[in-house]
Every structure is written in C-alpha cells, then in structure tokens.
Image (cartoon, rainbow, N blue to C red):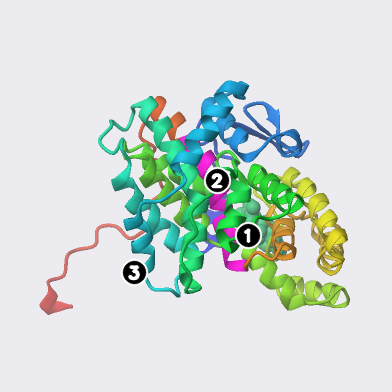
Amino acid sequence: MARGNQESMSSATHPDYRPGLEGVIGGITKIAEINSASATLTYRGINVHELAEKSTYEETAYLLINGRLPTAHEFEHYKRTLAHERPIPESVSNILKLIPRNIHPMDALKVAYSALAAYDPDYAAAPTDHAANVRKAERIIAKAATIVAAHWRICEGKEPISPDPELDTAANFLYMLSGERADEETVKVMDASLILYAEHTFNASTFANRVTVATLSDLYSGIVTGIGTLKGPLHGGANEEAMRMLLEIGTPENAEPWLRSALAGKKKVMGFGHREYKNGDSRAAYLTKMAKKVAEKKGVPKWVEIGDIMTKIMVEEKNIHPNVDFPAAYAYYMLGIPIDLYTPIFVIARVAGWSAHAIEQLDNNRLIRPTCIYDGRSGVPYVPMADR
Ligand SMILES: CC(C)(COP(=O)(O)OP(=O)(O)OC[C@H]1O[C@@H](n2cnc3c(N)ncnc32)[C@H](O)[C@@H]1OP(=O)(O)O)[C@@H](O)C(=O)NCCC(=O)NCCS
C-alpha cells in the first residue's frame, strides 16, 4: 500500500494506527535508552560517549550482555573466552569458499551464522536457558570479525588469516583483513565506532531479532534475522550508500549544487535523518570529531569539508541532522576500509546488542504478534479455474 494511503487511513478511520509503528512502544528494555530531546544514548545507564572515550568494545559487549561493567578478574576471563572463541570451524570457512564470490558480505554473514548454529556446543539447549544463551552470545560476538575478514580475503582470492589471540576485536579485524597490525590510532577509531554501533534500542534489526527469538526460536536465528534486516539502506546499509554518495559528489565545490538538486528531486540523502533523533544523533557528533582527527592526521580534509557543507544545508533547509552512518562512512574510507565492509562492520558491533536483546526477550518471553487493519476485498466468491 502506498504511504499516502496508509496515512489517510491512519487519521480517518483508525486514529491509533501509526504507519511504520512510529512512536509505538514495542516492549520494555533495561539495555539502552535513547533520549531524543537531549540527543543522548546510554547503555545500561552509562553515556555512550563515556564508553567510546574510556571503554573498549569487549568491555561494552560484557556490559550489554551482563548488565554491568566487569571487574578486572571477570574482564580478563571474558577476553580469554572471546580469544578462544574467535576462530571459525574450517567447515564454515569452506562454506564461505563455496558460495558465489559476487554476493554482498552481508549475505555471506547470514550464511556463516546459519551454519555456525549447528556447531555451537549448546545447540540442543532450551531456548530459554539463560546460561547457555550467554555462552552462545560470547561465541556469536567473538566470531563476527573473523567471518567478515575471512569472507573478504576469500573473495580476494587469498587464504583467511587466523585471529591473533593477543588482539582485541577492532585490532584483530584490521589484522585479519590485511595480515598486518594496524597502528594504535586506527584501532582506536575502529574500536570507538564499534562501541557506538553496538546497541540502539528497538531499531528495525533489533526488533526483528526479538520477534524471531520470541517464537522460542534460538539466538542464531535472531542474529540471521538481524543481519537481513540491517542490510537495507534505510538501516545499516546507509553507511555504504553514504560513501558512494560522497564519492559521486567528489569535491567540496560540488557539495552544495549536488545536495540542492537532490533535495529538489525529493531524493533521500543517505546518512541523514533518524526516526528517534530529531535534534541530532549523539553518536554522529562523537564520530564526526573522530573523523576530523583522522582527516587532519592523514592530510585528507575533503570528506569532512563535504560533510560539513551538507550538514549545514540539511539542518538549515530541512532540520534533518546526520546520523552515525554519515561520519562512519568517511572515517572508514580514510582508514582504507573497502566500502562493502562498512555494513558488515556494523554487524561486528551490533551482534552484542542483538544478543543482549535476545537474552532479555527470552528471559521474560511473550510471543510478539501485532494486529493489522484489513483493507482488502470481502465476500469474494471462489471462481473455478475453468471460469477465470
Ligand atoms: C532514517 C529514516 C529511514 C527515518 O525515516 P522516517 O522516520 O520514516 O522518516 P521519513 O522517511 O518519514 O521522513 C520524514 C520527512 O523527512 C524527509 N527525510 C527524512 N530523511 C531524509 C533524508 N535522509 N534525506 C532527505 N529527506 C529526508 C522525508 O522525505 C520526509 O519528508 P516529507 O514529510 O516531506 O515526505 C530516514 O531519515 C532515511 O531514509 N534516511 C536516509 C537513510 C539513512 O541514513 N538511514 C540510517 C538511519 S540510522
């Protein structure tokens, strides 16, 4: 149904109906909170900026799953567990070698997690077994970067590189892509972006993930659902589309005419706008600052300059602010990350949020099944095939 019809039906006959479920409360969570008015995001009550500044992706993942920061002893143990769980079974690596090489890495991630479910030692555990779900979450979180890097290298005609047990997620991902250890600043930008991408309440992929596990399915099925939902350009796929748009714009001089023409043509500008933030995305502000530092260090100011021009016009003309995917796009580009990996990097981070939500859902489960408005024909007789 066209959106216009949805809206007229909404106001005329069904005042409670909200197209796109805008503003509808889909559940209760203790994992994260978005405050739209102040443009702040907290994970388990801690401001995400503070986490990006002081924490690591691993510690943030522990916080999301377990509800509190780990002690030093707990964190050492957690890091050892993740290091142990990072390698993927050779058969899963072989599956990645067998599938067509021209598919998007997001589709390879769906294949890999579907296969990994079968190798999980807790495969037969009950879907509501909390301890087993926490162990599954550790395996899911540990393996994401390994899958993405292995698939990328296979597509490049190279052998996958085994994870280095000494490195954390961000550093390991960069190492498994190239075979070389990245410098500290590059790792810090990658790590902070993973923290910022790790969780975001009832966004489309997290909601879809909760719907899946709420049927008493399993965590891996929820992850596969999440990946499929994140792939689209209105959600996680926006970071790749934003970079392609910036490349098309090409120069700061072209930013304003390009954008004005796009707006006149009612084009969606990728990396701008958000259902929950109308005063700006807290994560975007933080990542823009980081991207500016990268631009200075690398002596490549143009993406930031284009970004600033676009931001100013979008806010002035439409009151629409950049979301996290906009600075993420040009930050990753300046770090030399291939564009097709931007949304998979989002997955490397978001598996923590998805797992935390799946566990929260299954700890206190009720089937998620909304209702709908029927707007089709009624009383239609069945016409036999020969009479049609
Ligand atoms: C994120 C997004 C899907 C939110 O969608 P939403 O809450 O349903 O908001 P709508 O698409 O209904 O947008 C409301 C209005 O703002 C406009 N708008 C929203 N985002 C826009 C954008 N990025 N570029 C241009 N116009 C935009 C819409 O065209 C619409 O205008 P209209 O009322 O004149 O038709 C939307 O902002 C978007 O498509 N952004 C680009 C993709 C993106 O960056 N996604 C990542 C999100 S983290």
Q: Regarding mark 2 in the picture, which secondary structure is present there?
A: helix
Q: Is residue 72 left or right of residue 96?
A: right
Q: Which residue position is annotated with label 2?
A: 350
As for residue 337 lying within the magenta part, the answer is: no
| Structural distance between the alpha carbons of marks 3 and 2 | 26 Å
In the image, 114 versus 255, the foreground residue is 114
Residue segment shown in magenta: 339-357
Which x, y percent locates residue 364?
A: 40, 25
Q: Residue at 32% x, 38% y: name it.
A: 215
- Alpha-carbon neighbours of circle 1 within 10 Å: few (<14), some, or many (≥20)? few
Residue type, numbered disc 3: Leu
- For marks 3 and 2, the one nearer the N-term is 3
Q: Does 70 sit above or below residue 127?
A: above
Query: Up-down: is 100 above or below 365?
Result: below
Determine if the magenta segment contains residue 356.
yes
> Tag 3: Cα neighbours inside 10 Å, few (<14), some, or many (≥20)?
few
Whole-Å distance between the Cαs marked 1 and 3?
Answer: 26 Å
Q: Name the spot of residue 142 as percent of width and height, x first.
A: 49, 43
* Kind of residue at badge 2: Arg
| Residue occupied by mark 3 | 98
Judging from the image, what secondary structure is the residue with disc 1 in? loop
Separation of marks 1 and 2 at Cα, in angstroms: 25 Å
